[in-house]
Amino acid sequence: MKSKIKPDEDLSMLSFEDAFLGDTRKSETSNPTNNDSSYDFDDDVQDTTVASSLWTKQRVKGLERKIANIGACEEKISLTKEMLAKAEVIAQVEEKFIIIKACGVLCAVDQHAADERIALEKLESALFNPEMHDGMMIHMTNKSIMVSDILKRSKLIPPKRISLTQKDMSTVKHHWSLLQKWKFTFEESDDKSLLLTGLAKVCDRVASVNNFLEFVKELGHITGGEIKPAFVKNVLASNACRYAIMFGDYLTHEKCVELIASLSRCEFCFICAHGRPSTIPLMDMNKDGKRSTREESAHEKDDTKFKDGNL
């Protein structure tokens, strides 16, 4: 016996539950036709895995409109790192999203945003990490980089003499060690100017004198703690983006599982390097299940009343 799957354009018209959660229709209820664009699946044991995989992918495609319009959803769904760590990978969709079920919450994971976040935190964790020596390699999806090449000093030839306001000079003196830590090197001159001798070099990109001055201005507005230069943040985010998985990249099921597991271990797992969401909750199946149970109970009561003649 064979069951039919309708073309993708028909699936997009289905309700969310029918498009994704509905059981495979049997031939006697699916009204099969001779449409050439239908997909046939044999019910033998050997084809079960293939049929199930293709069936799921076809149904998930019908959710694309739902994902695009997810912002219109009024009901808020909570998602935690713990839920993400326990998530079950269902399928990759259109080589863009990974559909997962996290403790009953159906989610769409942006594969590029997820890998971008993973790469960014790999790069950031290598900075000033005493457990990582300079010769160690940091592996992103499409590039590997040595720890020593993430952040280094680039000698400024010739040195650049710059004049600072009294406030900025005071900031430089107060944050002298922090500026040196980020590979900005300089000397104070007798005329109260600053002789800039070195600039930060991040992933082969060298900061400018303006980047240094902007960092000094930023430090002038904080009272304590450490801060990362905007130049460093931007270059790390740019590299994480450039060498991450892209839309259009096919991922095996094993790679999808690995990606979700790595994402769940990130400190900021729900946003990419540029602040976009990496994971979008689509539907809380736990709540829908409870609602369906209530509705079924109500229908059962109505049926009982009708049978008893109590209208």
Image: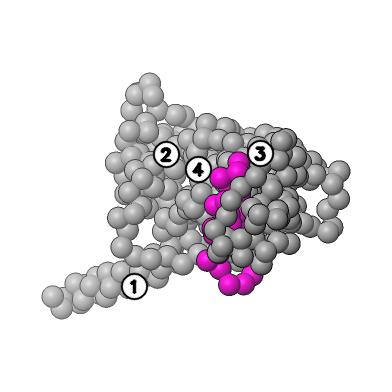
**Residue depicted at x 27% and y 69%:** 299
Nearest the viewer among 217 and 254 is 217
What residue did someone put label 2 on?
61
What residue did someone put label 3 on?
206
What amino acid type should be assigned to the residue bearing mark 2?
Lys
Q: Residue 146's image quarter?
A: top right
Question: Which circle, 4 or 3, is nearer the viewer?
Answer: 3
Q: Secondary structure at mark 1?
A: helix
What amino acid type should be assigned to the residue bearing mark 3?
Val
What amino acid type should be assigned to the residue bearing mark 1?
Arg
- For the residues labelled 4 and 3, say whether their Cβ atoms are less than 8 Å apart: no
- As drawn, which residue projects farthest toward the front? 191
What residue did someone put label 1 on?
294
Q: How many marks?
A: 4
- For the residues labelled 2 and 4, say whether their Cβ atoms are less than 8 Å apart: no
What residue did someone put label 4 on?
97
- For the residues labelled 3 and 1, say whether their Cβ atoms are less than 8 Å apart: no
Question: Which circle, 3 or 1, is nearer the viewer?
Answer: 3
- In the rendered view, tell whether residue 95 sits above or below residue 289: above
What amino acid type should be assigned to the residue bearing mark 4?
Phe
The answer for how far apart the CA atoms under marks 3 and 2 are is 44 Å
The answer for how far apart the CA atoms under marks 1 and 2 are is 30 Å
Is residue 310 shown to the viewer in this render?
A: yes
Residue 249 lies, in percent from the top left, at: 57, 32
94 drawn magenta: no
**Residue depicted at x 33% and y 33%:** 9
Q: Where does the C terminus fall, quadrant-wise?
A: bottom left
Q: Look at the image and give the residue range highlighted in magenta.
A: 208-230
Question: Which circle, 4 or 1, is nearer the viewer?
Answer: 4
